[in-house]
Amino acid sequence: MRSKSLSHYVAVNAFLIHHDRFLLLKRINPPIIWGPPGGKLHKNEDPLAGLRREVSEEAGLTIQIHQPVTTWFGRFRSLPLLSVDYLCTTDHGEVTLSDEHDQYRWLRIEELQIDVGVYLNSTYGFQLSDFYLAWCTYLLNQKRLTELGSYITYL
């Protein structure tokens, strides 16, 4: 059997919530954007293990992975990339940044709507609507159904 070349890279990202706030990291290398922790999987790496590794490397946090929330397919640095983005939580919010990032913020969903100095770049898959979907999924998982209705209109 002939070896086939890969069709694209796969990445995983964590819509990571702690005390009702999302973690966003600011990259130091282009594209210099804010986004959730995550990155490309290593060859033959299990996606959930890769997500745990990426969050640990980038933020020094241990996570609980709940479920996939969104997917994105596009180009990153001229390479085709499929990203699977998961809803995650953590019990500890003390972030230790890697050398890939120079800032972090824990932000409520309402803060992502206004200018708080965090720029979401939809070109690379991080859109406000994705955070709303993750937030609604989080509320469902937490059985906080009475709060859910006020966010449905943003989806």
Image (cartoon, rainbow, N blue to C red):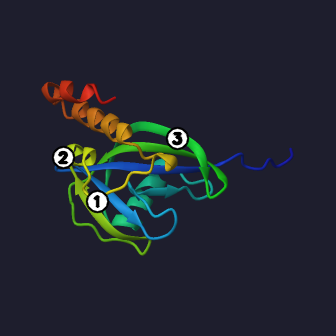
Q: Nearest the camera: 32 or 97? A: 32
Find numbered disc 2 in the image and state the secondary structure of the residue it sits on: loop
Task: Look at the image and tell me in which quarter the C terminus lies.
Answer: top left
Q: What type is the residue that disc 2 sits on?
A: Asp
- In space, the residues marked 1 and 2 are separated at their CA atoms by 19 Å
First of labels 2, 3 by sequence position: 2
Q: Nearest the camera: 77 or 142? A: 77
Furthest residue to the left? 146
Vertical placement of residue 80 versus 134, above or below: below
Badge nearest the viewer, 1 or 2: 1
Q: Position of residue 45 (x, y in %)?
A: 56, 54
Q: Which residue is mark 2?
A: 20
Furthest residue to the front? 115
Q: Position of 48 compared to 151: left or right?
A: right
Residue depicted at x 26% and y 37%: 138
Which quadrant would residue 154 be assigned to in this image? Answer: top left
Q: Are marks 1 and 2 in contact (CB under 8 Å)?
A: no
Q: Are marks 3 and 1 in contact (CB under 8 Å)?
A: no
Q: Position of residue 132 (x, y in %)?
A: 31, 37
Find numbered disc 1 in the image and state the secondary structure of the residue it sits on: loop
- In space, the residues marked 2 and 3 are separated at their CA atoms by 24 Å
Residue depicted at x 23% and y 53%: 107
Mark 3 Cα-neighbour bin, 10 Å: few <14, some 14–19, many ≥20: some
Q: Position of residue 73 (x, y in %)?
A: 57, 41
Q: Position of 153 compared to 33: left or right?
A: left
Q: Position of residue 21 (x, y in %)?
A: 21, 50
Mark 1 Cα-neighbour bin, 10 Å: few <14, some 14–19, many ≥20: few
Q: Which residue is mark 3?
A: 72
Task: Look at the image and tell me in which quarter the N terminus lies.
Answer: top right
Determine which of the numbered discs, if any, sits on residue 117 in the image: 1
